[in-house]
Image (cartoon, rainbow, N blue to C red):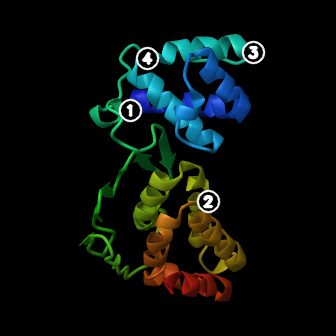
Amino acid sequence: MTTESASYLAELHQLLNQSFNLEEINTLCLQLNVDHESIAGWEKPARIRELLLALGRNGRLPALVSLAQAERPHLTWPPVPTDFQLPAALASGSASAPATQYHVYGDMVQGDKVGGDKVEGDKITVGNISNAQGIAIGRGAKAEVTIQQGVSGAELNQLFAPLLAAVARADVTAVPKVQALKAEVEKGEEADDEKMADLIGEIVDVAPAAVEGVVNLFTNSVVAKVAGGATNYVLKRLRK
């Protein structure tokens, strides 16, 4: 998927999500002769995502845009780019990666790739982080990155990249919660411990596959020292 196509899908997804409720999305499916029960996803964002993918594979996104424009004429609905294309895996319907692209803390989360750190299947390659050496880790391994000096925003981006990728694959709607957690960690000693604990709980509730990423993140000494009693209690429960 080109960057332009990914950005377009993200914009269209956001417009549909903000402008239509789930029942109205199902009605759009009916008007497009698409059986909404055949579209995966019980929650509205997931239903919209899968509808966009299904129509994108069949070259029918312009029909959706025209229909949305007729239903919500007060909004500006961008036309489908002339060079729009889905990657081979998504075009064949064999991939489950989200169609949308998210820019989070300067890192790009798109499908199963994260700018800066690369995540492909079970393999995670972590690049050099300031004065520390990155490592490649596989399923079940722990991220071990040692920072000898204070952590910067760019370094936190690298530390949070694997967690962002895991959450984006599981449920992209939980990405803002990872953003909020990173913002608290960045405050250092002024971080709200109870807020971090609540955010961790909300993240793993929505994306259970991210448990390992959360635990691994807080094995880093710089991140771990920000955690207080509430956060450590939640982490202890996750480790069991």
Distance from the alpha carbon under mark 4 to that under mark 1: 11 Å
Task: Please tell me whether residue 50 is drawn above or below residue 56 in the rendered image.
Answer: below
Mark 1 highlights which residue?
Answer: 3
* SS label for mark 1: helix
Q: Quadrant of residue 186?
A: bottom right
Q: Which of the numbered marks, if any, corresponds to residue 28?
A: none
- Label 2 Cα crowd, 10 Å radius (few <14 / some 14-19 / many 20+): some
Instruction: Tell whether label 1 touches label 4 (CB within 8 Å).
Output: no
Q: Measure the alpha-carbon separation of dots 2 and 3.
A: 31 Å
Which is nearer the N-term, disc 3 or disc 4? 3
Q: Amino acid at mark 4?
A: Pro
Side of 136 relative to 109 (left or right): left
| CA gap, disc 3 and disc 4 | 21 Å
**Above or below, 43 relative to 174:** above
For mark 3, what is the residue?
A: 74
Quick one: label 2 or label 1, which is nearer the N terminus?
Answer: 1
Return the mark for residue 177.
Answer: 2
What residue is shown at x 63% (from left), y 81% (from top)? 189
Q: CA distance from mark 2 to mark 1?
A: 24 Å
Which residue was labeled with disc 4? 81
Which one is earlier in the sequence, the residue at label 3 or at label 1? 1
Tell me how far mark 4 sits from mark 2, CA to CA: 31 Å
Q: Nearer the viewer, residue 112 or 223?
A: 112
